[in-house]
Image: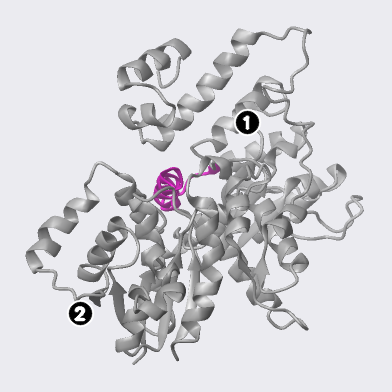
Amino acid sequence: MLRVLIAWVGTSDLYGPSKAAAGDVGPIAQALDVRTFDRVVLLESFSKPEHQNMLQPYVTWLRGRTKAEVVERPETLAGPTDFGGIYEAARRACQDVLAREKDAALTFHLSPGSPPMAAVWMLLGKTIFRAELIESSREQGVRTANVPFDIAAEFLPDLLRAPDERLRSQSTADSPPAPEFKDIIHRSQVMARLIQRARRVALRNVPVLIEGESGTGKELLAKAIHRASPRRGKPFIPVNCGAIPESLVEAELFGVLKGVGTGVDARKGFFESADGGTLFLDELGELPLPVQVKLLRVLQEREVTPLGAREPKPIDVRVIAATNRTVVEEVEAGRFREDLFYRLAVAVLKLPPLRDRPGDTGLLVDELLKVVNQEAATEPGYVPKKFSTGARNLILAHPWPGNVRELLLTVKRAAIWSDGATISAEDVRESLLAVPHAQRRDVLGRPLGGGLNLQKILKEVAQHYLGRALNEAAGNKTRAAKLVGAPSYQTLSNWLRKYGVGA
């Protein structure tokens, strides 16, 4: 049985190498001196540069003192009382151990780190995971911590209902409600609510319209909906409407008979190929208006007429459409048919950009680096990579206008440019591409004159951030007020009325 010690590295541990001569090696080294473990998992979250600089020398020193495998897990927390972040980091560490060794014997060290870290270890050790809890001190040595049942049963659950609601929301948010959605990595409430809706609509035989910026993962969400639907096991056919030449759109979608002068051979269309399953129409807004008319008829009549055919063929296809445009605005501009919009918009899911998904970037970048390491594992000379603290901080601070796609490509580039096993902040900085701002005439870049209206711009900004705050706070005005710096929920209510948000 694999014996695993899991602990947060505390500042007292960092000073262990310099104080070892005096017998003060720190809680983690003290535990390793008197107990036997096969693996030690160190959770690290230091924000001060002096502590970050001490970390690697400490780990090297610790490895020289024990035969156990020492595994580092850099984590980024919002602050010392970030219960949600602490909980998620600790829970993921335990899950990763048990995923490889399901019978591993876990031990949680309560002494190093902050009091909230100790509280979370007690919560996990007495509820989700069967783990021994230990504590240590110079005076009393290393001992098993006695946490009575009534504390675990009565006090610790209250931690989940504490004023800091992030613990409850974040501890459940990144656990997908169904295995079909497991590939959608998230922690944020906004994504948790989206997946709840997606799971619900998956069971209904209705069209779905997914709106979201480029790179947000619309096809990934569409696949999850298909897998969670009664149509699982039937075809899922993804189609990029913007990549089909206009002259071939009808033939590709609806099919074509032999002898029809379209420049393509006789073939089934995408609708027939998806019969019984799901057809995913990405970049739907790129379809020409005449094709939109025929698409509407297919959806209404549930039959398709290939080019050159006299009789229609019945089909049973569920359509999931996606666009990176705002369809309502496209309808108003005359670029999208209103009747088709209402036919598709039975269930509308709006995928938020990565910048509006608090807490998700840290989770995603870790998962993406795992993927990159796995894909490159067999390449000559490749060394598995990890992020330095500076690199992670730079990633977390970046707005990621290209969303998850940009994040993945940046991680891939950084893994290529890094010389050793650690991706540095400079590696990340060199991997970031200049963002084209032509499509983002943001509030700081709009030209003066020409109808510029400052009051309108201020209103746009207020509506944007008030809406984001309400969304993130799940409608709780007290929490939303804190998110936008309002002194009270009454002030927030006044702002909402003034700017017409949430009405």
Residue wearing tag 1: 326
Q: Quadrant of the N terminus?
A: bottom left
Mark 2 belongs to which amino acid? Arg
Extreme residue toward the front, this view: 22
What is the magenta segment's predominant secondary structure? Answer: helix
Residue 234 shows in the view = no
The residue under the point 49% across, 77% down is: 71
Q: Is residue 202 magenta?
A: yes
Q: Nearer the viewer, residue 79 or 155?
A: 79
Which of discs 2 and 1 lies nearer the camera? The answer is 2
* Mark before the other along the chain sequence, 2 or 1: 2
Placement of 98 over or under 503, stated as above or below:
below
Q: Residue visible at 61% across and 56% down? A: 390
Q: Which mark is residue 143?
A: 2
What colouring does the structure picture have? Answer: one colour
Relative vertical location of residue 453 with respect to residue 111 in this rendering, above or below: above
Q: Amino acid at mark 1?
A: Thr
Q: Position of residue 331 (x, y in %)?
A: 65, 24
Q: Residues within 10 Å of mark 1 (few under 14, many from 20)?
A: few
Query: From the viewer's perspective, is 366 left or right of 170?
Result: right
Determine whether the residue tagged by mark 1 lies in a helix, strand or loop. loop
Q: Nearer the viewer, residue 478 or 148?
A: 148
The part of the image, by quadrant, that contains residue 20 is bottom left
**Residue lying at 53% horizontally and 79% vertically, measured from the top left:** 60
255 vs 227, left or right, is: right
Q: Position of residue 436 (x, y in %)?
A: 79, 38
Q: For the C terminus, which image quadrant?
A: top left
Question: Helix, strand, or loop for circle 2?
Answer: strand
> For this rendering, which residue is in front, 85 or 438?
85
Q: From which residue to which does the magenta span run? A: 187-209
